[in-house]
Image (tube, grey):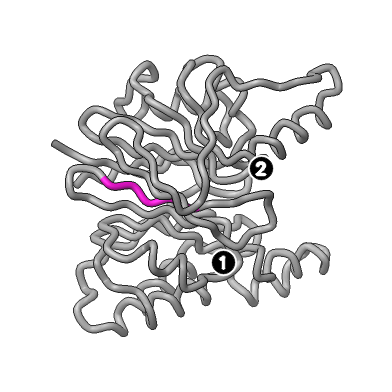
Amino acid sequence: MCVSVSVLASGSRGNCALVASSTTRILVDAGLSGRETFKRLRSIGERVEDISAILITHEHSDHVAGLQRLASKLNVPVFLTAPTHHAWSRAVRDKDEACAAPELPKSEHFASGRGFCVGDIEIMPFTIPHDAADPVGFTFRSEGVKVGFATDLGYMPLSVRNHLRGCSVLVMESNHDVEMLRAGNYPWSVKQRVMSRVGHLSNEALAEFFSSDYDGEAEYIVLAHLSEQNNHPERARIAAEQALAGRQGLWHNRVLLATQTDVLESIRL
């Protein structure tokens, strides 16, 4: 028996991950093309035909760009909230006027705070602060292992912190270095959006969580959604590791970096 987490891609150009148990395989987000998703799945030894479902966190294009194609090819249920489904459909229509009514072959709606199961994996969606219709993070439980995903959030409210307690694996946003963002080339309006409470989590904000309210349970921490313009992998890693080192008993946390271009080696528990 084994639970695994594989981040296929993470960043502003496309996000997709795989959470798997012995009998169930769930894609989290569909921000890559169908072809690229299948290529990356095969690179880690996964069979496309074994995918059980697709879960969507929110409707921004870097999380759903490949959704329609993947849903059609895989013919598996797509789980998303009703507001996210509506926002996705509207965005597809706006982009392609010929597509009057975009459809997902099999769609299932869920609501934050109400758990559900896909195969032998228990899923709990929870609300996160981000500028989308109804954005969520997830925790997954199977075979005694809990996995948490929290990316695309402007800050860490108490509700999110509570949901992430007891996780063996944490996939956490570490989007930008504040000084790099301020000094960078983004328009000021974009900088304000990224730094807002419905924007993206900075290295510094994540470090604050690790140093003050993190329970220290995770064997693996994956830093995700790193900005290619306003962050550097080593800055993100150092900020996280220094915050973790300041806590007693947290020496066992292993910090990994998810990237846009390379599949992160699967974590198996």
Residue at the image position 86 percent from the left and 22 percent from the top: 97
Residue at the image position 32 percent from the left and 76 percent from the top: 244
Q: Most extreme residue toward the right, as rendered?
A: 97
Mark 1 Cα within 10 Å, few/some/many (few <14, many 20+)? many
Find disc 1 in the rendering and name its residue. 201
Describe residue 198's horizontal placement relative to residue 269 as left or right.
Answer: right
- The kind of residue on which mark 1 rests is Leu
What is the C-alpha distance between the residues marked 1 and 2? Answer: 23 Å
The magenta segment: 137-141
* Label 2 residue SS: helix
Describe residue 78's horizontal placement relative to residue 193 as left or right.
Answer: left
Mark in the foreground, 1 or 2: 2
**In the rendered image, the vertical position of residue 36 relative to residue 128, given as above or below:** above
Residue 212 percent coordinates (x, y): 39, 83
- The kind of residue on which mark 2 rests is Pro
Residue 83 percent coordinates (x, y): 66, 42
Residue 5 percent coordinates (x, y): 32, 43
Find disc 2 in the rendering and name its residue. 83
**In the rendered image, the vertical position of residue 119 relative to residue 255, given as above or below:** above
Residue toward you, 183 or 220: 220
Q: Say whether marks 1 and 2 touch (CB < 8 Å).
A: no
* Label 1 residue SS: loop
Name the dominant secondary structure of the magenta segment: strand
Mark 2 Cα within 10 Å, few/some/many (few <14, many 20+)? some
**In the rendered image, the vertical position of residue 113 relative to residue 65, given as above or below:** below
